Image (tube, coloured by chain):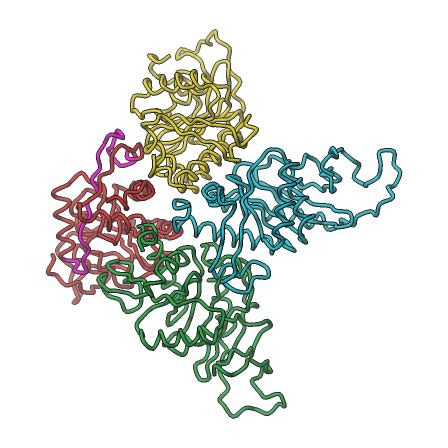
Chain colours: A cyan, B green, C red, D yellow
Amino acid sequence: MKNSKPTKRSRSGSTPNGQKLPVAKPNTAIFPKVAVELAEIGKNFYTRGWVLGTSGNFSAVISREPLRLAITSTGLDKGALTPAQFLEIDDAANVVRGEGRPSAEALLHLAIARGVDTGAILHTHSVWSTVLSGSHASQGGIALEGFEMLKGLEGVRTHKHREWLPILENSQDMIELGESVSKTLRESPNIHGFLLKEHGLYTWGVGLQEAKRHVEILEFLMEVLVRAGAAQSA
Amino acid sequence: MKNSKPTKRSRSGSTPNGQKLPVAKPNTAIFPKVAVELAEIGKNFYTRGWVLGTSGNFSAVISREPLRLAITSTGLDKGALTPAQFLEIDDAANVVRGEGRPSAEALLHLAIARGVDTGAILHTHSVWSTVLSGSHASQGGIALEGFEMLKGLEGVRTHKHREWLPILENSQDMIELGESVSKTLRESPNIHGFLLKEHGLYTWGVGLQEAKRHVEILEFLMEVLVRAGAAQSA
Amino acid sequence: MKNSKPTKRSRSGSTPNGQKLPVAKPNTAIFPKVAVELAEIGKNFYTRGWVLGTSGNFSAVISREPLRLAITSTGLDKGALTPAQFLEIDDAANVVRGEGRPSAEALLHLAIARGVDTGAILHTHSVWSTVLSGSHASQGGIALEGFEMLKGLEGVRTHKHREWLPILENSQDMIELGESVSKTLRESPNIHGFLLKEHGLYTWGVGLQEAKRHVEILEFLMEVLVRAGAAQSA
Amino acid sequence: MKNSKPTKRSRSGSTPNGQKLPVAKPNTAIFPKVAVELAEIGKNFYTRGWVLGTSGNFSAVISREPLRLAITSTGLDKGALTPAQFLEIDDAANVVRGEGRPSAEALLHLAIARGVDTGAILHTHSVWSTVLSGSHASQGGIALEGFEMLKGLEGVRTHKHREWLPILENSQDMIELGESVSKTLRESPNIHGFLLKEHGLYTWGVGLQEAKRHVEILEFLMEVLVRAGAAQSA
């Protein structure tokens, strides 16, 4: 996949000359509903300071066989996000529905969608994640342990849980960064998210509500660490 | 009580075979109104960052003889809390009205309702309480003294008052933790709240407005301590 | 005045036996309009975290000869403040219009109204003022200098202005504290506000908008000082 | 220009005796629309704490030949900003449309409009910029480097970009300060903004949305630096 070049295809998933492809046609009828929900979450995140400038992007899996994501197009002010600004992309990041170009980081969303069993992927750029991913980069990640709030992460049953939040080196080469993401997910299949250094958080969930909850919880815990002095003592 | 296993009972408070119990039937006609007020407070607290993820729970005493609480069911997004998500529980945490399962922490609400003369109990998970309950855990609590804001706590008449905010070790064993709460309330009957380590605040009031005021005041004072550097110097 | 005990009088300003007093009857027809404006400001301040719990109180001079203030009654949740919760008081803090009891701090409002040529007096309890008035109490005040924002204080024309924000020892004896306020205003007639230690800010203006602006500016500058590390290095 | 004294002229751009001037008449028909957009942004910035008191001012270029700006009049509460509070000024800061006096800082807006190819200029007074412009003044500026968020600045393609945010000494002499701004822009034509010491941020963009995005990004990065401890270690 990583060598495929994104090419514009018709919305019906057919070839340019109109012949049906032999692969199964994905059922992505939920796209409009998902776009509404993602736009709502994006605007909410903007007011919370998590996706300022044109930062952040959001996606949801709307088909698994073949893989299809609903995803924000690139370069948007998330404070004015609308459902019409979402695209449907295939597993090579080609646009198969909607107008616009997907974010270069669409390749990271696809890497996550392939690497974990997830239905929604949210990427935020908060002050807290920027601070901590810088201060802890040399340690390769941040350990979150002892906090009751950890129980809000799917599958966690006790505050004694130790959550490892890996920090990946940032890069503008999305193919390289996508491989780094895939490798991280293979090596640490139980993580709930990761940071890109001085960039932000990626987290996910089986559904959009779970993914949103994971953003809230991880952002909360990062704020706790910074306020408790972790950035200074790292 | 602590050995009783919660069992599902019919809504009428009768035994499974339909016979009326000999105990007095509680008058809990205020339940619907209380559920509306608790839901309103819960949503407000969410916007203030005090009950993110699925954290926090809220209850009100709607009958004393026998003891009945209106309480949030478990695992809810407090940003979308509705009156229909409240349950009526008896003094063994059995659900006697409403759909859903009470939070495991219902046992702590019951321990507080038995230990102090209170009408409402609010539990929040703020950043400030998480930071301070961690930094001051080894001291067993936090002393709040000299602040005019203390006068907002019921019965306090001067800023020279010294309020002790105990920090209890966190646990997932609610029976053990409930006993720890009961013991704390017996030993320190004049406290207005306590912290669970790296978990959050419990406070209460004779009515819902007083309990809400106590949350505001204790959260305010914890924020003051953290911003004044208390977490670093503890 | 300081020995006079506040007594309930009839709304018309007459003596209990119905005889008109020989003093001029104040024209306080603007009271209803002022109460609406003060309530609006109070609710706004609540959302900004400046008057949590039941803290804070607000007044406006509605007559100078004789002195009459519109002022919040005591013990209110400022998040739900209404015009009906304001009282008209005379220069001995007697209620001459409205239901309720004035705050004990009404005596401080009166001391300020007598000491400076002002039309509105606002008292807030922010986190920043609580922190700084504690950390700088031994220095007797805080110097604000070099900030462009100072130019928003009435009469200040340059950022090189040095504003002295005195810190008074807090007390529950309002007569003593009122004298302390009067003395401060005699000695430093050009100040724009003062702090009570670990209590909060008093500031004022010729009108309500100016007083509100002074709150914003002084709160802003105190936040700047705390974030720049002033509380730790004091 | 710097010696010209602003004089009140008639709205039509004609001389006092009604004769048409020989210079081209600027087409500033977009003024009403721009005033609406600037007022909207100003109110939004107020709620974010960036233009408290009467601080901050906003302008847009509505004609280049000859130069005309839409700009806030002086001394306004930005929380209640209306389109009617904007003025049209010429390149000597004379008012050619609207009621009121332009801010003294109009001369800085004009210096920026002449120095860079921009359509909108926004000036904010945040806590973060006040803190950092004080702590880093002796270094002459602040280096922003390594942050993904930098990519939101126009023309920046990688987080490895090093953005230099100059800090100019503050002054009440706007002619002197305007020259300092012009000199800075000549020497560093690629900057996206600058700070005035303990005063605030000036930034700009080809359009209003770009300028607003630059405010968000620079404010975000300054907050990151302060929270990471930069103000203490400078």
Q: Position of residue B13 (x, y in %)?
A: 56, 85
Q: Position of residue A6 (x, y in %)?
A: 73, 34
Give the side of residue C133 with respect to residue B175, left or right: left
Q: Residue at x 35, y 73 (%)?
A: B184
Compared to B220, does C167 lie above or below? above
Give the quarter of the image for residue A15.
top right
Compared to D129, does C102 lie above or below? below
Q: Quadrant of the C terminus of chain A?
A: top left
Is C204 in the magenta? no
Q: Residue at x 19, y 44 (%)?
A: C141
Is C154 in the magenta? yes
Q: Nearer the viewer, residue D39 or B160?
A: B160
Give the side of residue C107 with respect to residue D14, left or right: left
Q: Nearer the viewer, residue A210 or C178?
A: A210
Magenta segment range? C150-175
- Would residue C123 be seen by someone viewing this image from the given angle? yes
Toward the right, the furthest residue is: A19
Q: Position of residue C45 (x, y in %)?
A: 36, 50
- Would residue C29 be seen by someone viewing this image from the given angle? no
Q: Quadrant of the N terminus of chain A?
A: top right
